[in-house]
Amino acid sequence: MNQEMKSYVDSAEKELKKAGIKYRIYNDGALINAEDMDGITQSFYPTTGTIVLHASNKIRDCRTKVFKYRDIHAFIKGMKTKNLTGLYFKNEK
């Protein structure tokens, strides 16, 4: 990871901590997973500015929605939105 990206990931980590969001960083900062308000793990790829919204934490549920060209602030805003997945996915029974 180059110095510019490391600096961005460090900054993103500070923002997540300040917002009180549970998160984990993988692949030397290439992936940040965080829990939304409903406990569902969502993903942010800082190197590409991509947010991947997952419908649930169930292994067999592959429904996702991709948002490109976003930043850590958009990711944090999503993590603080109640019923985030309900805005994008129908509840399948």
Image (cartoon, rainbow, N blue to C red):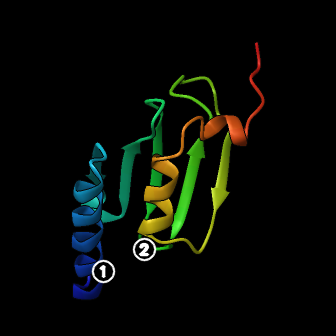
Q: Is residue 27 left or right of residue 78?
A: left
In the rendered view, tell whether residue 15 sits above or below residue 82.
Answer: below
Q: Quadrant of residue 76?
A: bottom left
Q: Going from the N terminus, do you reach mark 2 or mark 1 first? A: 1
Q: Position of residue 37 (x, y in %)?
A: 45, 36
Q: Left or right: 80 with respect to 5?
A: right
Q: CA distance from mark 2 to mark 1?
A: 7 Å
Q: Is residue 58 above or below residue 23?
A: above
Image quarter hosting the N terminus: bottom left
Quick one: 74 or 1, which is closer to the camera?
74
Q: Quadrant of residue 2?
A: bottom left
Q: Which residue is mark 2?
A: 47
| Residue of label 1 | 5
Which residue is rendered at x = 71% and y = 41% of the image?
A: 87
Q: Residue at x 78, y 30 (%)?
A: 90
Q: Secondary structure at mark 2?
A: loop
Nearer-the-camera pick, 79 or 48: 79
- How busy is the neighbourhood of tag 2: few (under 14 within 10 Å), some, or many (20 plus)? some
Relative image position of residue 65 (x, y in whole percent): 68, 49
Image position of 70 with respect to 41: above or below: below
Residue 54 against residue 4 in the figure, above or below? above
Q: Position of residue 30 (x, y in %)?
A: 36, 64
Marks 2/1 in contact by CB < 8 Å: the verdict is yes
Query: In the drawing, what numbered circle is on residue 85?
Result: none
Tag 1 secondary structure: helix
- Residue 46 on image: x %, y %: 41, 69
Residue, x 23% and y 77% (percent of image)? 6
**In this rendering, would 31 be left or right of 84?**
left
Mark 1 is on which residue type?
Met
Image position of 71 (left or right of 2): right
